[in-house]
Amino acid sequence: MISEGSMIHETFYGEYLKNLLAGHHRKCRGMVQELIDEGIGIKELYTDLFQRSMYEVGELWENNRITVAREHLATSITDSLLNLAYPSLFSTARTGKRAVVSCSVNEYHQIGAKMVADIFELHGWDGHFLGANAPAEDMARFIHEVNPDVVGLSLSLLSNMDKLKHHIDVIRADFPQMDLLVGGQAFRWGGLEVIGSYGRTQYIPSLERLEATLAEA
Amino acid sequence: MEEEILFYLLERAPLLFFVVDNRGRIVQANGYAETVTGFQLRGTPLADLIVDFSGTFDPGNLARESHKEHLLNIKARGLPQSYYFTFTEVQDQVLVFGRSDTEEIESTRRKVQSLNEDLNNLTRKLHKTNAQLEQLNRLKDQFLGMATHDLRKPVSAIVHYTEFLLDEATEALTSEHVGFLQTIHSSTALMRRVIDDFLDISLIESGRFHVNLDATSMEEPMNRSLELHRPVAKKHGVALRVSQLKPLPVILMDDFKVEQVFNNLISNAIEHSPTGGQVVIDLSLTGEGVTVAVKNTGDTIPIPELEKLFEPFERGQNRKARGIRSTGLGLSISKKIIEAHHGRIWAENPEEGGAAFCFTLPLDPQRGLRSE
């Protein structure tokens, strides 16, 4: 649902979703640019437009209402629209803290994780994003290089839980004291007990919860 | 049952099907073929659907190898599409089937999607790096501003005290010591000009550069600048001349900053004029506003440099007639001053030779130049 007092009204959202599903990327871009020009907050843009529409696209796919190709097209469009927010996102005052965010191997849904990296940026952190399908060993090398305060891992498909566990094990082997945050759509279907078995590993169900966690950090 | 299967294969499956007569014309096509091509197919030569660069397409010939698949491109809606075709002769007709390679299409789609993601991630990295560079640039400007601000006072003190010594104490000194003092004076005066340029650039880059507009005639800042430069021009044998046909209107300008522009342009013009040459300052009222052209009799400016000259630290390839040192910031600062008045500054090579640096200030800086 759209947050109270949001700049994005239902009719606007409906029009955007219609264009997104039809693959009209220029129309979507124009609508997002319009919101940015009107001064919409990045968090509001992310949750009320990008996150909401991608959840809805995901549900349409899960219910066999749209094809994989259509879902991927909507995802690609949304991914490219995040670029519009970056000029203001990266100019926020820096805290000196760093986060590395990634998807595990075999995970090709990167938008959620990227939005998480962007929320870190919005709060003045350096939010390094490694992309989809990033091997655990590459991530460990990058962590050595960047020395982050926090590592974030995203899981979209529960069937990839073993890959996520491998990621956590590889990171834990080199960085036993590293704080890990995990999240993603996969946890709607289970897997929280796996996360609970690891120390210093926290499940983050939403961007709001992430913001609350960052406020406490 | 066969009928059901046949109906499904021909009408529902993503498969192209044509029956072609012995003249190569389509006598029957399935619904999928018409959807893909967007053509009314009955009666159309099959060759018209095929993208055939060699012009040798002949279904009858291809039917002689009925076991073989042929990769061909058809004119589909939008871009051409690739299908694997088989041609089978049945009585005096040819049955044509075309299948697409869905594996290849799917794998290509995944690769394109992955490339798109990589591109988006690199764009994110680029934005992040840009923001970091902008921050570093701000820190550099801050440092430059603080350093030059702190240096200006002691350097000015050295200039003033050496001037004082040169005025008051030369009788008590040997000619060699007076020479030392003159070198200290000219070097510190240059250092102060450099510091002033850096201070201006620092103000410009930080967005704190403002103009204070007052009603002034263009002759006022020009005359002050001319007075300042007459001794140097005389020393180097360069004549200074003003060319003005009509009186000019009083316009709104920051006359001290416009004087700074005159100082930069006139000193540059003297530096680039050979001994015996002249610098002409041409004042005129044009459709745009009041235009000033400072012309010298030195070398012309290579065309590629005309625009770049106004960028910071661009000194151009032209050799100066004499080795007067500068920071390379004068023209860049002049450009900012003129732009702050909503005016225009440029360099050109006049037909009569030499080079000219020109600027126009609008009659009303609030409205900008008339031609805009």
Image: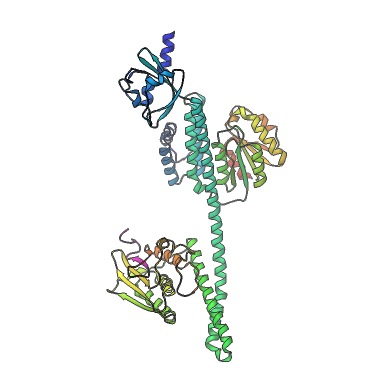
Q: Position of residue B201 (x, y in %)?
A: 49, 65
Q: Position of residue A6 (x, y in %)?
A: 46, 40
For the residue pair B318 and B263, the one nearer the viewer reads as B318
Can you see residue B115? yes
Q: Is residue A188 left or right of residue B96?
A: right
Where residue B43 sits, quadrant-wise, is top left
Instruction: Tell me which residue sits at (51%, 40%) in the image.
Output: A46
Instruction: Tell me which residue sits at (47%, 29%) in the image.
Output: A70
Q: Considering only vertical position in the picture, is B263 above or below A51?
A: below
Residue A186 covered by magenta stretch: no
Q: Position of residue B265 (x, y in %)?
A: 41, 71
Can you see residue A55? no
For the residue pair B41 and B50, the one nearer the viewer reads as B50
Read off the magenta span: B357-372
For the residue pair B311 and B291, the one nearer the viewer reads as B311
**Residue that lies at the very extreme toward the bottom in this rendered image:** B171
